[in-house]
Amino acid sequence: MNTSHLITKHPFHPLGVEIPSYLANTLSVPTLLAIFFTGCTVILGATYKLVTWRNPNLGRGDLSVALWFALCGFIHLFFEGK
C-alpha cells in the first residue's frame, strides 16, 4: 500500500515523522498579531468594564490582577479548548 500521499510536509523535527491532521498556516505574522491584539483588547476592555461596574472603588493593583487573570484565562481556554 502506498501511503506517500498521506504524509504532510511540515517544518518540525524530525522531518520524516507524520503529523496527523497537520494544516500549514496560511496567514501572515502581521495578520496573526493583529487578530491576537484585537482579541486582547476586546477581552481586557470587557473585563475592565465589568470589574469597574461591579466594584468601582477597586485599587489599581487589584484591577491589574483581575485584568491579568482574565486575559490568561481566555488565552488558556482558547488554545486548549477546555
Image: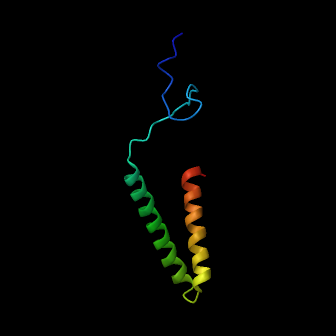
Location of residue 13 in the rendering, given as x and y in whole percent from the top left corner: 58, 33
Where 20 sits versus 82, above or below? above
For residue 59, above or below residue 8: below
Left/right of residue 40 with respect to residue 13 in the rendered view = left
**Relative to the observer, which residue lies in front, 51 or 72?**
72
Which residue is the extreme one toward the bottom? 57
Image label count? 0
Residue 17 point in image, percent of width and height: 58, 27
Q: Is residue 51 shown left or right of residue 5?
A: right
- State the residue in front, 32 or 62: 32
The answer to whether residue 81 of the structure is visible from this angle is no
- Give the color scheme: rainbow, by chain, secondary structure or one colour: rainbow
User: What residue sits 41% from the left and 63% below the top?
Assistant: 38
At x 38%, y 46%, the residue is 27
**Which quadrant holds residue 39?**
bottom left
Q: Nearer the viewer, residue 48 or 26?
A: 26
Quarter the N terminus occupies: top right
The answer to whether 38 appears left or right of 1 in the picture is: left
Q: Up-down: is 55 above or below 73? A: below
Q: Position of residue 59 (x, y in %)?
A: 59, 86
Q: Is residue 27 visible?
A: yes
Check the image and name the residue furthest to the top: 1
Q: Residue at x 55, y 79 (%)?
A: 51
How far across and down, in percent of the image, does residue 28 sit? 38, 48
**Res 78 quadrant in image:** bottom right
